[in-house]
Image (cartoon, grey):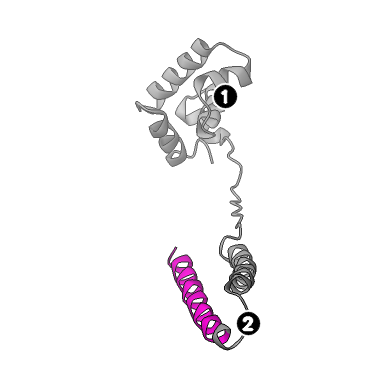
Amino acid sequence: MKQVVIAFGLLITALLILFGVAKFYSIGHETSGDFWIGAFSLLFLVIGILLSRKLFAKTIVVNHQQPVAINHDQLLQSGISKREAEILLLIHEGLSNQQIADKLFVSENTIKKHISNIFQKLQVERRTEAIKKALELSIIK
């Protein structure tokens, strides 16, 4: 943001200087002010386009995350079923209960029951706590 303010401040300063030069130049010549206004407008239009391309260039951030998987050894020790682990992975992806139900072709009430069982087995009360605990216990990796 600071760069944009400085750039436009410099552009305005340059414009004022050019108008001053044009005023002194037009005193001795028969050139009208409309010509200079048009010339400077075109000049600053081109400068503005070039600056906007540089200052507002889109940057794409690619975040390479390793896919989350189930650790079957820890799964057996924790007492969580494979289906509950699958639901835990979908919770980790950020899906809602209805989205999970649609993806697994079951009812939303079934998903709620599985989530309740997961909470009970992991001894947590919230989805975020369940994910955190599953990561700590290496149930999902």
Give residue 20's position: percent from left, percent from top: 49, 81
Q: Amino acid at mark 2?
A: Glu
> Seen in the image, is 124 located left or right of residue 45?
left
Q: Which residue is mark 1?
A: 82
Q: Amino acid at mark 1?
A: Lys
- Mark 2 burial class by Cα count in 10 Å: few <14, some 14-19, many 20+: few
Q: Please state the horizontal and vertical placement of residue 19, each as a whole percent of the image.
A: 52, 77
- Classify mark 2: helix, strand or loop: loop
> Splitting the image into 4 quarters, where does residue 127 fall?
top left
Is 84 placed above or below 132 here?
above
Magenta segment: 1-25
Of residue 87 and residue 137, the one placed in the foreground of this image is 87
Q: Residue at x 38, y 33 (%)?
A: 129
The residue at the point 46 percent across, 40 percent down is: 135
Q: Which residue is mark 2?
A: 30
Task: Tell whether 139 sits left or right of 104.
Answer: left
Query: Residue visible at 44% across and 67% down?
Result: 5
Number of other residues with Cα within 10 Å of mark 1, as a class: few under 14, some 14 to 19, many 20 or more: few
Viewer-side residue, 41 vs 125: 41
Q: Position of residue 95 (x, y in %)?
A: 53, 28
**Does residue 41 sit above or below 86 in this rendering?**
below
Residue at image point 57% right, 17% down: 101
State the image coordinates of residue 29 (x, y, percent, origin top left): 61, 86
Question: Where's the C terminus, which quadrant?
Answer: top right
- Give the vertical position of 15 relative to 80 (above or below): below
140 sits left or right of 126 in the view: right
* Quarter where residue 131 is shown: top left
